[in-house]
């Protein structure tokens, strides 16, 4: 990067002797450094209010407000407390004053007459640190803008894809109704139906991804039954070839959750199992409602997770980047749905099996106490 591209760095020089300020400015003059001059503590404070300063060079002995008093005032202000201070002094004998200067926030003392090379070297360190900080801040801001733009594009893309997708889905349904006995039409219509449903899920994941990047995933909790939601989720995949899908329920599967979000969680986990699991091993969905406060959900499939995705399994686009196929958003959305309900999700893989476990508190935090079990309603 040339000096023309570097951000300007401001150095404040404070001395009651004008000739000393002129000498400091001459010694430190170089492209990209701006020297602010102040002849008193009061004038220095005014400059500090107007400018972001990388370093302050302050004379210790000044009439009115001394350099030490100025430093103490700077340390007392949120705006200026992190500004590095190098004190300039002609007095080398007052150890107590030097100690007080370090207490006031000095990073160094330079004794007059000042060695020009030493001064430029010390100032250069803080100038470079400030430049790096400014460049990093600019990069972070640029990254934030790009991220925001990408999220807006994802949202717009997901929204605008729904209309043509809906037309494709309706066309497939019309084919099935008009030619119900034609095996070729039935096969093509079924493929259109299943593919359009999958595309609809992907679009929903894109929209949810954009939502989670802007904040927490919104949920609308109400009375729900995980058994019914599991059966609905399994019905979505009934036409897909697999070794078998089955579910097991023990205990009470009811609670207060957002039914649509929980259905999405189950669908994403089942879809993940179908896509990445061993096709020769049945997929089992287990719901355990024996705990009064928490309902546990497990989805088990054959096969093990690749080593290159285990550490970042619930991060967005991991599977896609690792060559696993898909958009890589399904498990990311699962994680956020569980978290939005006060729960969590984890995976365990080994010995030829992979199990995803979701822990869902029976009562969503916003509706705690709104749901009652049968024993409570009956006064038991």
Image (cartoon, rainbow, N blue to C red):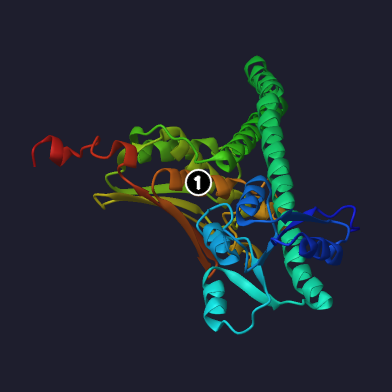
Instruction: Please rate how many residues cluster around mark 1, counting C-alpha atoms within 10 Å: few if below 14, some from 14 to 19, many from 20.
Output: many
Q: Position of residue 343 (x, y in %)?
A: 40, 50
Above or below, 247 against 307 in this view is above
Secondary structure at numbered mark 1: helix
List the residue tagged with mark 1: 336
Q: Identify the image quadrant of residue 23.
A: bottom right
| Furthest residue in direction front, as rendered | 63
Say if 112 sits above or below 132 in the image: below
Q: Quadrant of the N terminus?
A: bottom right
Q: Nearer the viewer, residue 5 or 227?
A: 5
Q: On screen, 184 above or below 85?
A: above
Locate the C terminus by quadrant. top left
- The reply, left or right, for residue 79 in relation to residue 287 is right
Point 60% across, 70% down: residue? 106
Q: Residue at x 60, y 61 (%)?
A: 63
x%, y% of residue 332? Answer: 57, 49
Image position of 210 (left or right of 370):
right
Query: In which quadrant of the rendered view does residue 315 lie?
Result: bottom right
Image coords of residue 228 (percent x, y) = 38, 36
Q: Is residue 325 left or right of residue 246?
A: right
Q: How many marks?
A: 1
Name the residue rendered at 71%, 30% in the picture: 157
- Residue at position x 50%, y 46% from top? 336
In the rendered image, the residue lying farthest to the left is: 379
The one nearer the camera, 319 or 41, is 41
Q: Is residue 174 above or below residue 269?
A: above
Q: Nearer the viewer, residue 356 or 275?
A: 356
Let me know if residue 25 appears in the view. yes
Percent across and percent down for residue 202 are 64, 37
Q: Which is more toward the observer, 74 or 308?
A: 74
- The answer to whether residue 187 of the structure is visible from this angle is no
């Amino acid at each position: 990067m040339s000096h023309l591209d570097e951000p300007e760095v401001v150095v404040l020089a404070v001395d009651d002797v004008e000739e000393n300020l002129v000498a400091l400015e001459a010694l430190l003059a170089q492209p990209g450094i701006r020297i602010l001059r102040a002849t008193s503590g009061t004038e220095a404070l005014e400059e500090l209010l107007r400018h972001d300063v990388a370093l302050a060079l302050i004379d210790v002995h000044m009439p009115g407000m001394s350099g030490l008093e100025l430093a103490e005032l700077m340390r007392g202000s949120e705006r200026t407390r992190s500004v590095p201070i190098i004190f300039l002094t002609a007095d080398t004998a007052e150890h107590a004053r030097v100690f007080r200067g370090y207490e006031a926030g000095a990073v160094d003392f330079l004794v007059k007459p000042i060695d020009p090379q030493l001064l430029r070297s010390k100032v250069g360190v803080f100038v470079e640190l400030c430049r790096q900080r400014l460049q990093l801040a600019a990069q972070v801001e640029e990254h934030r803008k790009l991220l925001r733009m990408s999220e807006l594009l994802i949202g717009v893309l997901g929204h605008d894809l729904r209309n043509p997708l809906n037309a494709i889905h309706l066309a497939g349904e019309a084919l099935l109704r008009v030619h119900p006995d034609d095996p070729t039409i039935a096969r093509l219509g079924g493929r259109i139906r299943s593919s359009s449903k999958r595309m609809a899920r992907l679009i929903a994941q894109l929209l949810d991804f954009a939502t989670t990047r802007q904040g927490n995933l919104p949920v609308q909790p109400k009375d729900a039954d995980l058994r019914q939601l599991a059966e609905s989720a399994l019905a979505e995949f009934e036409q897909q070839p697999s070794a078998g899908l089955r579910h097991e329920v023990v205990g009470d599967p009811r609670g207060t959750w957002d039914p649509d979000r929980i259905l999405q969680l189950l669908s994403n986990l089942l879809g993940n199992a179908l896509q990445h699991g061993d096709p020769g091993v049945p997929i089992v969905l287990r719901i355990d409602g024996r705990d009064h406060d928490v309902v546990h959900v497990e989805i088990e499939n054959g096969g093990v997770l690749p080593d290159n995705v285990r550490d970042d399994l619930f991060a967005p686009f991991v599977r896609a980047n690792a060559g696993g196929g898909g958009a890589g958003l399904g498990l990311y959305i699962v994680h956020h749905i569980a978290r939005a309900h006060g729960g969590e999700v984890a995976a365990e893989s080994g010995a030829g099996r992979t199990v995803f476990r979701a822990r869902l508190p029976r009562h969503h935090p916003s509706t705690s106490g709104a749901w009652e079990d049968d024993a409570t309603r009956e006064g038991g």
